[in-house]
Image (tube, coloured by chain):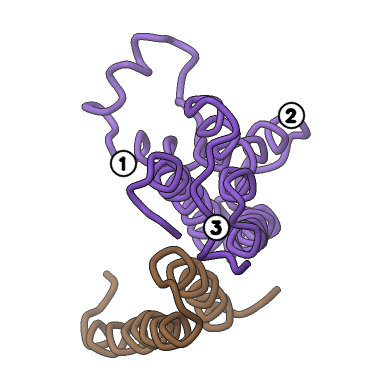
Chain colours: A brown, B purple
Amino acid sequence: MLDHLTLMVLDGFLIAVFFSFLWKRDRRERWLYFWKVFGALVVGAIVLAWVMYPFPRG
Amino acid sequence: MTDRDKPAGLVLPLPVLLVLAWLVPGLGHALLGRRLRAAVFFVVVVVGFVLGLALDGELMLPASGDALAFLSMPASDPLRFLALIASVGNGLMFFIAHAVGAGQGTVTAAAYEFGNTFLLTSGMMNLLLILDAHDIATGKKDW
């Protein structure tokens, strides 16, 4: 099956498409909003993962 | 005429429209003449739902058939209750999946949590679509 990073990117993609069509009216606005949301989700998750990295699970 | 120029014409009584919007993702928008957005919403929600099932995600149900247990769920198990609402938010797909025995969830599967994430986000997105269809139908949103 797909690895977790790919699944996260896919989930971010679906969410970004959904909200860009839900909240934005024009094509240009939608593109801009899509990249903002998609970038925030993917980059944010990776940054958060690195912030959590020093903390052990146990 | 583009998607955005179409008037918010209500062809069905509002409660019926909202129930249809819940049952089939994007149907509310389609009935209101927003065909492009309806198609996009349908694809996004259905793809998310199918991926969730394929990844061994779990469609939440009340832990017990006891009505009292269900009513006390918001207090006793609020997270599961919210997950239940999100699962049921998938509309007809939720019931079909249960009817065919899908969405039982495999806790030991590597992608179980991701499966849940896809199933819950698709349900929440569909619930948001109901609210959006309501706003269009009542004229609060003109596109």
- In the picture of the structure, the residue carrying the numbered disc 2 is B99
Kind of residue sitting beneath label 1: Leu
Lateral position of residue B122 relative to residue B100, left or right: left
Compute the Cα span from label 3 to label 1.
40 Å
The disc label shown at residue B6, or none: 3
User: Which chain is indicated by disc 3?
Assistant: B
| Sequence-first tag of 3 and 1 | 3
From the viewer's side, name the closer residue of B47 and B21.
B21
Relative to the observer, which residue lies in front, A34 or A46?
A34
Q: Nearer the viewer, mark 3 or mark 2?
A: 3
Question: Residue, x 59% and y 56% (percent of image)?
Answer: B34
Reading the image, the residue beneath label 1 is B79
Give the side of residue B22 with respect to residue A44, left or right.
Answer: right
The residues bearing labels 1 and 2 have C-alpha atoms spaced at a distance of 24 Å
Q: Secondary structure at mark 1?
A: helix
Q: Which quarter of the figure is the N terminus of chain A placed in?
A: bottom right
> Within 10 Å of the Cα at label 2, are there few (<14), some (14-19), or many (20+) other Cα atoms?
few
Residue at image location 49% in from the left, 69% down from the top = A21
- Amino acid type, mark 2: Ala
